[in-house]
Amino acid sequence: MADPSIVDTWERLVRYHRTTTTAMDRHLQATFGHSLDDYDVLHQISVHRGPIRMGDLAENLLVANSSCSRIVGRLANGGFIERSQGESDGRVVLVDLTTTGDSLRRRMAAAHVRDIEARFGAPLTPTQAADLDAILRRLLAKPPTEPS
C-alpha cells in the first residue's frame, strides 16, 4: 500500500496544478479572449520554429490529443495559424503561425510569464525553487514503473 504522506503530497500537487492553471486560464480568457490551451498551441508551434506536423504538435501539447484538432481549427478560423499539406505526402497536415498569431502569442506569453512568476515563483525562495526544479527533473527523467 502507498505511503499516505505520498498520496497526500500527490493530491496537493494535483490540486495546486488545477487551481493555478484554472486561474491562469481565466486571466488569459479575460485579457485576450483565448484560453491557456490556445496559448499552448501557439507556443508549441513557435518553439518548433516553422511548420509542424499536426501529429507532432498533438504529442507536444499539454492538452488532450482529442482537443488538438478543435483548437487548431478555431485558431485557423481566427487567422492565427495556417494549415497546409505536406510536400511529399498530401495526407500530412502542417500548421504554422501567421503574423497575427505570433503577435497574439507574444502578448499572451508576457502575461503568462507574469502569472507563473506571481503564482509559482513568488511564494518560493530561490533555494526552494531550485530544489523543486531538481525534484521535478528527477521525476521526469525516471520512467514510471507499473504498479505490482
Image (cartoon, rainbow, N blue to C red):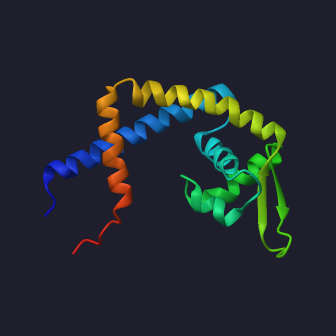
Question: Which residue occupies 32% across, 43% down?
Answer: 13
Write down the quadrant of residue 134 in the picture: top left
Q: How many marks?
A: 0
Horizontal side of residue 67 vs 95, given as left or right: left
Q: Nearer the viewer, residue 61 or 132?
A: 132
Write down the quadrant of residue 42 in the picture: top right
Question: Which residue occupies 57% across, 31% down?
Answer: 112
Q: Quadrant of the N terminus?
A: bottom left
Q: Is residue 122 above or below residue 55?
A: above
Coordinates of residue 140 in the picture (x, y in percent): 38, 56
Coordinates of residue 46 in the picture (x, y in percent): 69, 46
Question: Which residue occupies 62% across, 33% down?
Answer: 109
Write down the quadrant of residue 102 in the picture: top right
Horizontal side of residue 3 vs 142, given as left or right: left
Q: Quadrant of the C terminus?
A: bottom left
Coordinates of residue 126 in the picture (x, y in percent): 34, 28
Coordinates of residue 129 in the picture (x, y in percent): 34, 34
Horizontal side of residue 14 vs 54, given as left or right: left
Q: Is residue 110 above or below residue 1?
A: above
Q: Nearer the viewer, residue 15 or 102?
A: 102
